[in-house]
Image (cartoon, helix red, strand yellow):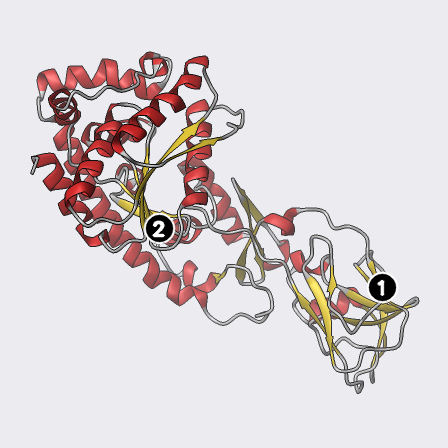
Amino acid sequence: MNPLAARLLHHLEPWRDAGHWRIAFSGGLDSTVLLHVLAGLAQRQPLPPLSAVHVHHGLQAAADAWPGHCQAVCDALGLPLQVIRVEVQPGASLERAAREARYGAFAGLTAVNELLLTAQHRDDQAETLLFRLLRGAGVRGLAAMPHIRPLGAGHLLRPLLGVSRDELEGYAAEHGLSWIEDPSNKDQQYSRNYLRHQLMPMLRARWPQAAASMSRSAAHLREAQGLLDELALMDLEAARGQEDFPWLDLPSLALGPLRQLSAARQRNALSHWLSALTRLPDSDHWVGWESLRDATAAAQPLWRLADGELHRAGERIWWLSGDWLRPLGAGCSWAAPDQPLQLPGNGQVYFSGQAPARPLQIRYRQGGEIMPIDGRGHRDLKRLLNEARVPGFVRGRLPLLYQGESLLGVANLPGLRAEPRSAWQLHWQAPISDQGLS
């Protein structure tokens, strides 16, 4: 067996029972070698079903010919190919936008117990470390590309991270492979290309093992990040605690336990928690956390991040995104209170027990609402919500039940009803924050 094939099979051994191996196939050298090696192994070994996927970004005219090349290669190897066209969103970094579009497509394809295999190699890993070092990345960023990570409902695996580009070129020459040369790979206006064509050759000329050494450093940093993650989990466990509004299905943490940690441990715990929710802030932006943490309890501060907001209510912080940050529409008439009522952008409400007589309507706070409370007379709703310690960011979204012009009750707060001895309860299933960043 070819040495490269043997190494690849060893790395993939734990995944021999996967439901599908899908190869990300750009048509370039690296993915062509990966595809060829796996196709050869599949003829001699019992492997999961193999297929290839080519993502067409449509960013340059030359790319229109690449799906045809990839199809010809796959036909020769007897492997199915799926071509996916994506739209790259304009932005400051075309490289980043293309990468996000590509991996978004990959995530949509990868089902439970399936692998997406990509062909990044040791030199790519070294370039990633150097690129992130020059951008001032911390330990998490300098750990560079992980060998494996979740993707979609399955996993992404990079089985060639220990293989040099020279080894891949040697394999391709030995087997007479042809591949696509992307013209944009020579454009040194892109930072990665500048590193690849200018800086890395100088480093290798002085230190021939530079790429291997940097790849090894990335592995050490990845191990260090693993220890930091373990510490973060311990600190977060203490901060989760019991909160007073379990019907708010939102990520949240108690502020008290976080305050007891050093500033570095606070950032470590929050970075771990936020990494599943949003792109992490740079070093300068962490002053937003300090302002949120140190504000007075009545200030109701928030910290805006790339994909949502962190709000503070009393001694707890809450992550909001998606519908929680969009304006609410008008209220809704409830024609069939025996059925749940969908609230545009605000979850749904439903009754338990016998609903009050119609006509019923769901409205939202406008200010100045008054409702009768048994034994207390007519009370200002704002004061009642203060007494119930309802977080400020919730109050404008709380469904209010009206019968004509009479306020009968507030969803999920049984104590706030005009008829306390009635059998009905109004329940609100609040929207959840969008989650699932990888």
Image coordinates of residue 112 in percent, x first then y, are 38, 55
Q: Residue at x 81, y 78 (%)?
A: 355
Numbered mark located on residue 64 in the image: none
- Against 275, residue 27 (above or below) is above
Q: Is residue 75 left or right of residue 335?
A: left
Amino acid type at mark 1: Glu
**Residue depicted at x 32% and y 48%:** 20
Tag 2 residue: 268
Q: Badges 2 and 1: C-beta atoms under 8 Å apart?
A: no
**Which one is nearer the viewer's eye here, 432 or 155?**
155
Q: Nearer the viewer, residue 389 or 101?
A: 101
As helix, strand or loop, the secondary structure at mark 2 comes to helix
Q: Residues within 10 Å of mark 2 (few under 14, many from 20)?
A: many
Numbered circle sitting on residue 369: 1
Q: CA distance from mark 2 to mark 1?
A: 43 Å
User: Dot 1, crowdedness within 10 Å: few (<14), some or many (≥20)?
Assistant: few
Quarter of the image where one finds residue 197: top left
- Point out residue 5 in the picture as x, y percentages from the top left corner: 13, 38
Image side of residue 72 versus residue 59, left or right: left
Q: Is residue 160 visible?
A: no
Q: Position of residue 10 (x, y in %)?
A: 13, 46
